[in-house]
């Protein structure tokens, strides 16, 4: 393993001093400055583990593959929200903290980490399915503001609260079996009852289902 190799060196090796990552909002030098702060451990397969947080939000990215390194694991949180992503190919396999991919144009969760130790946010996208979602989420799972009609693909266990407000849900099929916090399901195509929710899901907190959608 090669620890803490300069990300600028990696950038220059791959793209040259005037090379570019396709982007809408960030100039090359600003991107280098952003990447320079990552604490990297290089793996034998050429990928990297990151010691700390990674913030790729608000970069105008169309794909995480535009970033010139591949990340296997993030010891902190990973933020790629507020871009123009349609999928999450190129995301880490494991994130020990939170994973934020909200406010994009995601139509699929393909490529998301299998393990997220903190909160997982995929709200305000164009998702019609949760297939591909992490197998384990230790914190909250937030998928509101999408076009979901069922919860198929959701994790079986969510350590925190589960929010699926403002979708087009007509069924709770695929919902987690266990939710450690609250379960909130307002503003959907069907108005669910607390009894209906608790019959399907072991919710340790409150169930909030009082409002019907459009």
Image (tube, grey):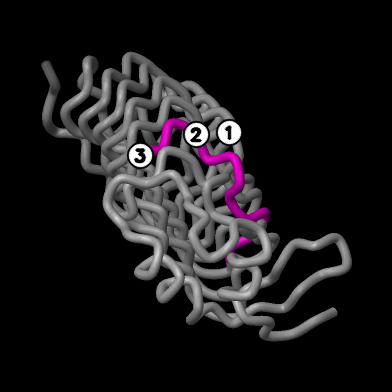
- Nearer the observer, disc 1 or disc 2? 2
- Mark 2 packing: few (<14 Cα in 10 Å), some, or many (20+)? many
- Mark 3 packing: few (<14 Cα in 10 Å), some, or many (20+)? many
- Nearer the observer, disc 3 or disc 2? 2
Specify the label residue 143 is tagged with. 3
Mark before the other along the chain sequence, 3 or 1: 1
Cβ–Cβ under 8 Å for marks 1 and 2: yes
Please give the range of residues in magenta. Answer: 85-95
Element at label 2: loop
Element at label 3: loop
Q: Gap in Å between the C-alphas at discs 3 and 2?
A: 15 Å
Q: Is residue 110 found inside the magenta-colored segment of the image?
A: no
**Residue at numbered disc 1:** 110
Percent of width and height locating residue 62? 42, 38
* Residue appearing at x 67%, y 65% in the figure: 13
Percent of width and height locating residue 7? 59, 74
Q: Is residue 91 found inside the magenta-colored segment of the image?
A: yes
**Residue at numbered disc 2:** 87
């Amino acid at each position: 393993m090669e620890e803490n190799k300069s990300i600028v060196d990696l950038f220059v090796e791959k793209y040259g001093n005037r090379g570019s990552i396709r982007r809408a909002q960030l100039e090359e030098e600003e991107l280098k400055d952003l990447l320079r702060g990552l604490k990297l451990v290089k793996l034998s397969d050429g990928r990297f583990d990151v010691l700390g947080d990674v913030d790729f939000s608000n970069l105008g990215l169309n794909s995480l593959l535009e970033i010139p390194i591949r990340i296997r694991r993030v010891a902190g949180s990973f933020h790629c929200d507020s871009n123009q992503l349609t999928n999450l190919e190129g995301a880490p396999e494991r994130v020990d903290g939170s994973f934020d991919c909200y406010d994009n144009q995601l139509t699929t969760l393909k490529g998301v980490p299998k393990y997220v130790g903190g909160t997982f946010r995929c709200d305000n996208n164009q998702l019609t399915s949760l297939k591909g979602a992490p197998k384990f989420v230790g914190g909250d799972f937030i998928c509101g503001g999408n076009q979901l009609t069922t919860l198929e693909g959701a994790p079986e266990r969510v350590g925190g609260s589960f929010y699926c407000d403002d979708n087009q849900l007509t069924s709770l099929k695929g919902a987690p079996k266990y939710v450690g916090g609250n379960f909130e399901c307002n503003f959907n195509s069907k108005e669910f009852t607390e009894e209906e929710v608790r019959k399907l899901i072991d919710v340790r907190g409150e169930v909030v289902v009082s409002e019907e959608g459009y």
